[in-house]
Image (cartoon, rainbow, N blue to C red):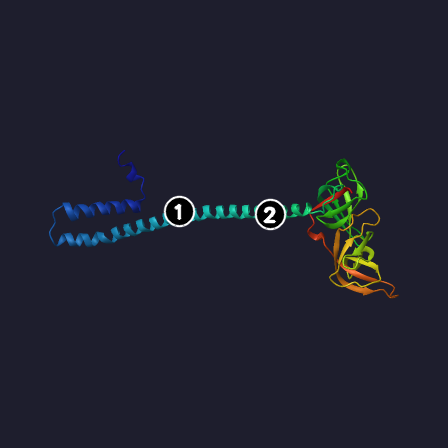
Amino acid sequence: MRLAWFRNLKPAIQLLVLSGLIFVLLAFYIPLSKYIRPAIISLLLPPLKLCEGVSSNARQFLRFQDLAEENKRLKIKVDNLAGQLLQLEEAGLENQRLRSLLSLPQSKTLQTKAALLIGKDSSNWTMTVLINQGTSSGIRKGMPVVLGANLAGKVIEASSFAAKVALIVDFNSKIPAKILRTREEGIVFGARQGGRVVCKIKYIQGAIEIGDRIISSGLGKIYPKGLLIGEVIAVEEEENKLYKVAEIQPAVEFASLEEVTVITSQ
């Protein structure tokens, strides 16, 4: 039983162990002539050095395995930290959006309801989105929809738990508006130009310049007065030259729109 461990060793390792024992016995315990002892030592040194090399390689292999395991653990930690960083970044962006939702102008009579976008419908003539609030939350047809202090559109259909919103770039959108700088009034509407969905203001007879900001005028009692619609980026004249038409860059970035606020009472 005491030698069971030796029998379990591979033959090559058994040979190295036996060589080591013989070397020790012959070199130190068995009396040999001064000529025979060096010869035996010279004969047994190669396998002993081989044994030492195998041992060294084994230690290096084990160390390599330890480093590989440590590298694997560190990679898992890095992946976890990267995931946490991404979650923090998304939370930061969401926080910015929620702050924007709360940036409406102060009004004693203004009541709102926040909503999330759950669908989009874009075609050649329509630009609508679906939100997750409906009549059960007090949403009704005709209510204006904003993002912060920027006008986004209005509710055109409402069911119990969802509502459809026509954006200001929708072809059927008509918004009473004015130039902030000159106070001249016009109508903002959705249009298509060169394959792009754009917003324009028309019926302007006075001066209008690139960079002018366009706001809701409050006429018609649908949209509150003073909501930012966008900024003029191009000006053109109608053929009859009775009035001017200007292209507007909407203040709301509809491509990345995720949340809106419905004004339920003005």
In the image, residue 236 above or below residue 261: below
Kind of residue at badge 2: Gly
In the rendered structure, the answer to whether residue 56 lies left or right of residue 239 reads left
Q: Secondary structure at mark 1?
A: helix
Kind of residue at badge 1: Asp
Q: Secondary structure at mark 2?
A: helix
Checking the image for residue 92, the label placed there is 2
Please report the residue visible at 46 percent of the width from the left and 45 percent of the height from the top. 73
Q: Quadrant of the C terminus?
A: top right
* Residue under label 1: 66
In the rendered structure, the answer to whether residue 99 lies left or right of residue 173 reads left
Which mark is first along the chain, 2 or 1? 1
Image quadrant of residue 190?
bottom right
Checking the image for residue 43, the label placed there is none
Q: CA distance from mark 1 to mark 2?
A: 39 Å
**Residue 162, percent from left and from top:** 75, 40
**Residue 79, percent from left and from top:** 51, 47
| Mark closer to the observer (1, 2) | 2
Q: Nearer the viewer, residue 44 or 211?
A: 211
